[in-house]
Amino acid sequence: MISRPDGAPIEGSTLTRYFNALLHRAGLRRIRFHDLRRHSRATLLLEQGVELVVIKELLGHAHIGVTATVYAHVRLRLQRDAIDLLGHALRNAAEITGKPNDGDEPPLVGSTVR
C-alpha cells in the first residue's frame, strides 16, 4: 500500500492522476501504474537468463508472441551483450596465440558469463 506522509492511504484514482501527470511531464507514453511492477519483473527475469516461455507463463500471456513483442528491446540488448562477450573472448584468444582464431582450436581463455 502507498501512503501519504501522514500515513493515510492514497486513493487509487489520486495515484493514477499523479502518475499520469509525471509521465506527461517526462514525455513518456501512458501506461498503467501496475505495469511498472510487471515490466520490471519480466525484464529482471530475462536478464537472468530465464526462458521466454517461462516468463510468458508467469505473466499470464496467452501467446508467447505477446511476450516476445513486449520485451523485444530487452532481448535485443541481451543479444548485443552476448555478441560483445563472444568478441572479447575471440580477441583474447588471438592476443595470446598471436594469430586469429580460425575455429579449429578450442579457446585458450574463458570469459565471465553474467
Image: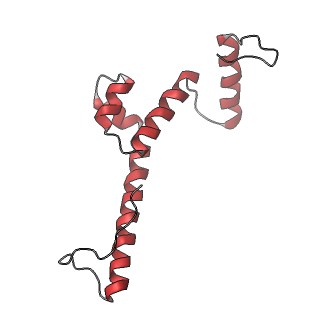
Quarter of image, res 93:
bottom left
Residue 104, placed above or below residue 78 = below
Depth check: 18 or 60 in front?
A: 60
Q: Residue furthest right?
A: 6
Residue 108, placed above or below residue 74 = below
Q: Position of residue 97 (x, y in %)?
A: 31, 87
Residue at x 22% of width, y 74% of height: 106
Residue at x 20% of width, y 78% of height: 105
Residue at x 42% of width, y 58% of height: 81
Query: In the visual, does 87 lie left or right of 23?
Result: left
Quarter of image, res 80:
bottom left
Depth check: 27 or 6 in front?
A: 6
Q: Residue furthest bottom?
A: 98
Quarter of image, res 51:
top left
Q: Position of residue 89 (x, y in %)?
A: 36, 71
Q: How many marks?
A: 0
